[in-house]
């Protein structure tokens, strides 16, 4: 809580701040209506700097976490050296600048839809205004046509059935629908059918009016491949992950050019466990090869538009290469469950990459597998903006 943090550094704040910064902070707090004119005048009437500082911090602190957050934020802008000395420089979370400066109690009371916290209108407008060139634009909900595809293999001819996968399929479908996507679901496909399904999906005309897409693949898997339902060995009925990127790249799917394309893959990537046991004293030092300089290139222009073959992708994989991915036959896959949970809780104020970082933090504290972000070429922040 920001008000508690101010209480902890109250004495040091009073001793360390100067009159010029106090005057600047008063202007900031008046502008944001954290303090009124009478409260600001009361601070200014004191001749001693310490008395001004004492009244200032006490007035703000008593107004609660939201007001206290403003003071911390303004202090960082006006006197970063003092803020750092007070330990306030990193006291706001990574998402805080786009949270609309609200307290945990207010976060809990946010309007929600089926468990998804909705982005307040004022925050939505603030992010759009402040980060307009740094985020992927979203289209008018009255005219856009968002599409998502889920392919979930559950029953196999020669491999164990993926019990619990139906839970992943159902919950992911509900989540994407609540985010404004029309969701198509396909189950129990062989590798050729997966390829055909993706190609047909990429050709959908609705992508022209869309502002992004989701593709979710769930099956048994290998290093960079997933299994069709007829898989008997590593040589039969195997779908290459590379096919996804070639199918939706800027050449083969121009309707999604420049739009975020999210690929979610729930599958094993090998047979190794994603954790190990270490003694407290164990250390390791990785060795990195020296960087290799690129040769000079001579570029020529023939007055045509140059477009990257592949861009604007983010691929969220349930585990790292060579490792297994865990699934409960009752509650579904650990990765899908956590991803859905974190999107519901944090997509209202965090970009998708920041949401995924929270998924990684969960697994870092619960070491059974480590999801990974592969082949990511997003050039901007992708906000889901639930409710908009």
Image (tube, rainbow, N blue to C red):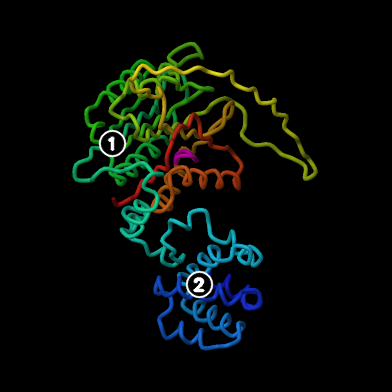
Q: Which residue is mark 1?
A: 183
Q: Nearer the viewer, residue 351 or 70?
A: 70
Query: How far apart, in angstroms, are the residues tagged by discs 1 and 2?
Result: 52 Å
Image position, residue 9 (x, y; %): 63, 73
Q: Residue at x 63, y 22 (%)?
A: 293
Q: Residue at x 47, y 25 (%)?
A: 220
Image position, residue 65 (x, y; %): 48, 71
Vertical side of 166 occupied by 47: above or below: below
Instruction: Report the label total.
Output: 2
Q: Which residues are magenta?
A: 332-336
Image position, residue 202 (x, y; %): 30, 25
Asked if one can make out residue 1 in the rendered structure from this viewpoint, the answer is: no
Q: In front: mark 1 or mark 2?
A: 2
For the stretch drawn in magenta, what is the main secondary structure? helix
Image position, residue 295 (x, y; %): 59, 18
Q: Please give left or right for residue 64 compared with residue 4 in the image.
A: left
Q: Residue at x 61, y 34 (%)?
A: 274
Q: Which residue is mark 2?
A: 24
Name the residue furthest left: 142
Q: Are marks 1 and 2 in contact (CB under 8 Å)?
A: no
First in residue order: circle 1 vs circle 2: 2
Check disc 1 and report its element: helix, strand or loop.
Answer: strand
Asked if one can make out residue 41 in the rendered structure from this viewpoint, the answer is: yes
Q: Nearer the viewer, residue 298 or 157?
A: 298
Vertical side of 330 occupied by 51: above or below: below
Q: In which quarter of the view is residue 153 placed? A: top left
Check disc 2 and report its element: helix, strand or loop.
Answer: helix
């Amino acid at each position: 809580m920001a008000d508690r943090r101010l209480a902890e550094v109250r004495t040091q704040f009073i001793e360390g701040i100067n009159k010029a910064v106090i005057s600047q902070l008063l202007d900031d707090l008046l502008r944001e209506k954290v303090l009124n004119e009478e409260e600001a005048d009361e601070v200014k009437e004191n001749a001693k700097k310490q008395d001004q500082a004492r009244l200032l911090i006490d007035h703000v602190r008593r107004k609660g976490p939201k007001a206290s957050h403003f003071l911390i934020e303004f202090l960082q802008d006006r006197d970063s050296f003092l803020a750092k000395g007070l330990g306030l420089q990193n006291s706001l979370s990574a998402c805080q600048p786009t949270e609309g400066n609200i307290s945990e109690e207010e976060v809990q009371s946010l309007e929600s839809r089926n468990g998804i916290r909705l982005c307040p209108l004022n925050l939505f407008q603030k992010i759009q205004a402040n980060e307009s060139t740094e985020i992927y634009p979203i289209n008018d909900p009255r005219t856009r046509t968002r599409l998502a595809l889920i392919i979930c293999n559950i029953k196999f001819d020669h491999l164990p059935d993926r019990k619990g996968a139906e839970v992943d399929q159902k919950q992911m479908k509900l989540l994407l629908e609540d985010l404004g996507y029309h969701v198509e679901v396909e189950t129990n496909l062989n590798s050729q059918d997966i390829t055909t399904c993706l190609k047909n999906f990429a050709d959908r005309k609705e992508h022209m009016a869309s502002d992004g897409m989701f593709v979710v693949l769930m099956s048994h898997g290998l290093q960079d491949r997933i299994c069709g339902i007829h898989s008997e060995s590593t040589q039969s009925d195997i779908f290459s992950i590379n096919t996804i990127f070639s199918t939706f790249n800027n050449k083969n799917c121009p309707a999604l050019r420049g739009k975020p394309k999210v690929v979610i893959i729930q599958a094993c990537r090998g047979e190794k466990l994603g954790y190990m046991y270490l003694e407290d004293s164990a250390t390791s030092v990785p060795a990195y090869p020296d960087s290799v300089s690129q040769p000079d290139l001579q570029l020529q222009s023939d007055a045509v538009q140059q477009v990257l073959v592949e861009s604007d992708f983010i691929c969220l994989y349930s585990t790292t290469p060579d490792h297994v991915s865990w699934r409960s036959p009752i509650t579904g896959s650990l990765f899908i469950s956590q991803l859905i949970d974190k999107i519901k809780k944090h997509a209202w104020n965090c970009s998708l990459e920041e949401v995924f970082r929270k998924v990684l933090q969960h697994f870092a504290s619960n070491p059974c597998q480590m999801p990974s972000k592969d082949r990511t070429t997003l050039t901007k922040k992708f906000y889901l903006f639930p409710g908009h």
